[in-house]
Image (cartoon, helix red, strand yellow):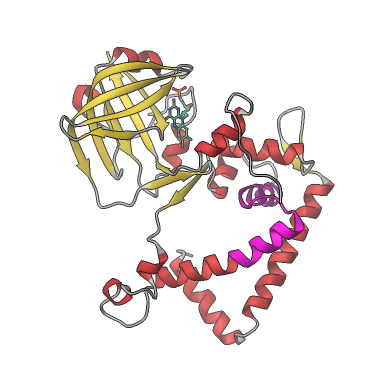
């Protein structure tokens, strides 16, 4: 077993960042407006600080292009993204171009843009801006909030994710009947979760034994193989990783010899990368075949039909 990375952040910043990524967060777009100039950026540094008075904070990179507008503006709005707003998270995680182009929004306190379809909004008056290393911490007093019945988008390990109830509560546990009072079977979501974790656990053991790359790197590699020439955004969205997570995965895959990066920045699988994808698919198919061998063709067909319908296709 390789030794788990540990040490001083000064020695390996990338590993330090990775360790920080073990703390899951939500995803926000913080927006502001000063003299008609709009600014907004994806941020997961948001945290609640105090209920009385109602204070929240987030931090902004000193290299951010939006910094001058946030410095001058008196207010900002925290837009907590909903699970189906991955596209917005990616759009506001990039510098440059007008991020608000074609986007409907409402002016909140101090004119800060409030975005539609979000899970919650906190409209804040800026209290202070605290110098903190390569970031500034912005402390704000919440003047108005709104919340909607929408699940939030999550972020952990450099990847976007969804909130799923702890499985014991939705299937089979002591509270199973309370969770689904109309029937004595556990909820479908609980069954899907158990099936997913059970099936992927077997593959993970095999992955570790064969020295295959991590789940997200494997996904990125397969997608680059399946969609040659696709835009980075497309690959990031399909693999459910952030632009930065994609960059890290590509760098790691290139340095292990699975990907070649062309002079124009394009990616392509090396022969080693192709072999890896083939091996991965073969092993996944073999494990799946063994997991499903107890079922009849008719049972599998019905299950596939139900799962496809639940997945929207
Ligand atoms: C999930 C996620 C969370 C982020 N959180 C922050 C943050 O808290 N503070 C920050 O300065 N940048 C954060 N970023 C990076 C900015 O969104 C990114 O640098 C953006 O391009 C800044 O835009 P700007 O340069 O136009 O201001 C985050 C990016 C992602 C994908």
Q: In this view, does 135 lie to the left or right of 291?
A: left
Q: Camera-side residue: 254 or 52?
A: 52
Which x, y percent locates residue 48?
28, 35
Compared to 233, does 30 lie above or below?
A: above
Q: Is residue 240 left or right of residue 124?
A: right
Q: Camera-side residue: 126 or 17?
A: 17
Name the residue furthest right: 271
Question: What's the magenta bit mostly, secondary-structure-wise?
Answer: helix
Residue 146 sits in quarter: top left
Which x, y percent locates residue 84?
40, 49
Which x, y percent locates residue 250?
67, 38
Which x, y percent locates residue 171?
39, 72
Compared to 230, does 129 lie above or below?
A: above
User: Which residue is found at the position 71% from the left and 34% from the top?
Assistant: 266
Residue 201 sits in quarter: bottom right
Q: Camera-side residue: 168 or 300?
A: 168
Compared to 281, does 177 lie above or below?
A: below
- Taking the magenta stretch, the answer to whether it contains residue 208 is yes
User: Which residue is found at the position 60% from the left and 39% from the top?
Assistant: 246
Q: In this view, does 276 lie to the left or right of 170?
A: right
Number of numbered discs visible in the structure rendering: 0
Q: Camera-side residue: 254 or 206?
A: 206
- Taking the magenta stretch, the answer to whether it contains residue 312 is no
User: Which residue is found at the position 47% from the left and 31% from the top?
Assistant: 93
Q: What stretch is highlighted in magenta?
A: 200-227
């Amino acid at each position: 077993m390789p030794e788990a990375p540990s040490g001083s952040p000064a020695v390996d910043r990338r590993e330090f960042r990775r360790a920080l990524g073990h703390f899951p967060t939500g995803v926000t777009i913080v927006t502001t407006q000063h003299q008609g100039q709009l600014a907004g950026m994806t941020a997961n540094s948001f945290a609640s600080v105090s209920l009385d008075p109602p204070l929240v904070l987030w931090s902004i990179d000193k290299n951010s292009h939006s910094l001058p507008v946030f410095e001058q503006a008196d207010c900002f709005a925290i837009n907590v993204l909903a699970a189906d707003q991955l596209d917005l998270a990616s759009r506001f995680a990039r510098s440059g171009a007008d991020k608000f182009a074609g986007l409907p929004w409402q002016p909140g306190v101090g004119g800060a843009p409030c975005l539609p379809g979000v899970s919650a909004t906190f409209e804040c008056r800026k209290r202070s801006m605290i110098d903190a290393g390569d970031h500034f911490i912005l402390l704000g007093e919440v003047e108005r909030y709104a919340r909607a019945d929408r699940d939030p988008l999550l972020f952990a390990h450099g990847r976007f994710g969804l909130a799923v109830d702890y499985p014991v509560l939705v299937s089979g546990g002591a509270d199973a009947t309370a969770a689904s009072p109309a029937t004595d079977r556990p909820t479908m979501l609980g069954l899907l979760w158990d099936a997913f974790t059970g099936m992927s656990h077997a593959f993970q053991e095999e992955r570790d034994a064969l020295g295959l790359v991590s789940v997200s790197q494997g996904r990125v590699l397969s997608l680059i193989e399946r969609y040659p020439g696709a835009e980075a955004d497309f690959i990031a969205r399909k693999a459910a990783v952030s632009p930065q997570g994609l960059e890290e995965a590509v760098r790691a895959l290139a340095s292990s010899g699975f990907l070649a990066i062309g002079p124009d920045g394009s990616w392509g699988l090396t022969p080693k990368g192709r072999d890896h994808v083939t091996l991965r698919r073969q092993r996944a198919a073999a494990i799946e075949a063994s997991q499903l061998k107890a079922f009849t063709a008719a049972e599998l067909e019905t299950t596939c039909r139900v799962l496809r319908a639940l997945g929207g296709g």
